[in-house]
Amino acid sequence: YTRHCKNTLYVVNIDFSMDSICDLLARTLNDMAYDDDIKVVLLLIDYPGGASTQIEKIDRALKLLRKKGKYIVAVVDSYAASGGYVFASAAHKIFTRGGSIVGSIGAYYLIEDDRRKLKDKGIEFDRIYTHHPSDYIDDHAKDFFDRDLERTYKEFKQTIKIRRKLTKQEIDDIGNGQWYSGLAAYKIGLVDALDGYCGAFDLIDCLFNHEAYGFVFIPNEFVIRRWLKGL
């Protein structure tokens, strides 16, 4: 990233494209955390969630930004579901619109089984085992996935409970995988305001003491070039 002027707003775009550059984006956010000239970060979130490992990497980087004193503002435009809401919850203030989709505090595994699809296409194959074959997902694997899913779900709820200052009863009531409109999310304390970009930039203007500021967009051309170079 490149600094443009004395006061600079760093705008981090989190959408579907994040999945392909997750590691690089996490490293960039970590670098930003140690840059003393960065004061304010704006998260633009349109993200439905993804793999827990990717979400944890970005969330750790966002926590580091806060720890190093950066003020984070999040704007949820269309949706911030599951992992998208984890990112939003890392902000000091969350802005959205009444019709946006927020929440889905839950977790699930998606495991694809191609065997039926291959059979329908007339594709068959033989297997040679060095061990006794088992079902595609046996009882031991199912038990592992169940326990890991429950752990992820509990951590998710605990994170939101702490960040949004909710009681245990409140997070238990709303943390059931349900989607909420922006208006409903505001009423139950998942977001701070319903004036979207207007409210976010009013706050940012105050954070910069009403002085002029420039913009740096992440991921930008520099980040993309670093990603392409690593292919």
Image (tube, rainbow, N blue to C red):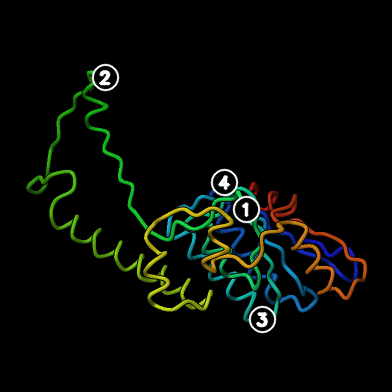
The one nearer the camera, 163 or 218, is: 163
The one nearer the camera, 199 or 56, is: 199
**Separation of marks 1 and 3 at Cα, in angstroms:** 32 Å
Name the front one of labels 1 and 3. Answer: 1
Query: Residue tagged by mark 4?
Result: 16
Q: Residues within 10 Å of mark 3 (few under 14, many from 20)?
A: some
Q: Residues within 10 Å of mark 4 (few under 14, many from 20)?
A: few
The amino acid marked with disc number 3 is Lys
Residue 212 horizontal/vertical position (percent): 92, 66
Which mark sits nearer the N-terminus, 1 or 4? Answer: 4
Residue 33 horizontal/vertical position (percent): 67, 74
Give the image quarter of residue 11.
bottom right
Query: Residue tagged by mark 3?
Result: 68
**Separation of marks 4 and 3 at Cα, in angstroms:** 27 Å
Residue at image position (51%, 66%) is 188
Residue 199 horizontal/vertical position (percent): 75, 62
Query: Residue tagged by mark 2?
Result: 121
Asked if the residues shown at circle 2 and circle 3 are in contact, with their CB atoms under 8 angstroms apart, the answer is no
**Separation of marks 1 and 2 at Cα, in angstroms:** 46 Å
Q: Residues within 10 Å of mark 2 (few under 14, many from 20)?
A: few
**Separation of marks 2 and 3 at Cα, in angstroms:** 55 Å
Which mark sits nearer the N-terminus, 1 or 3? Answer: 3
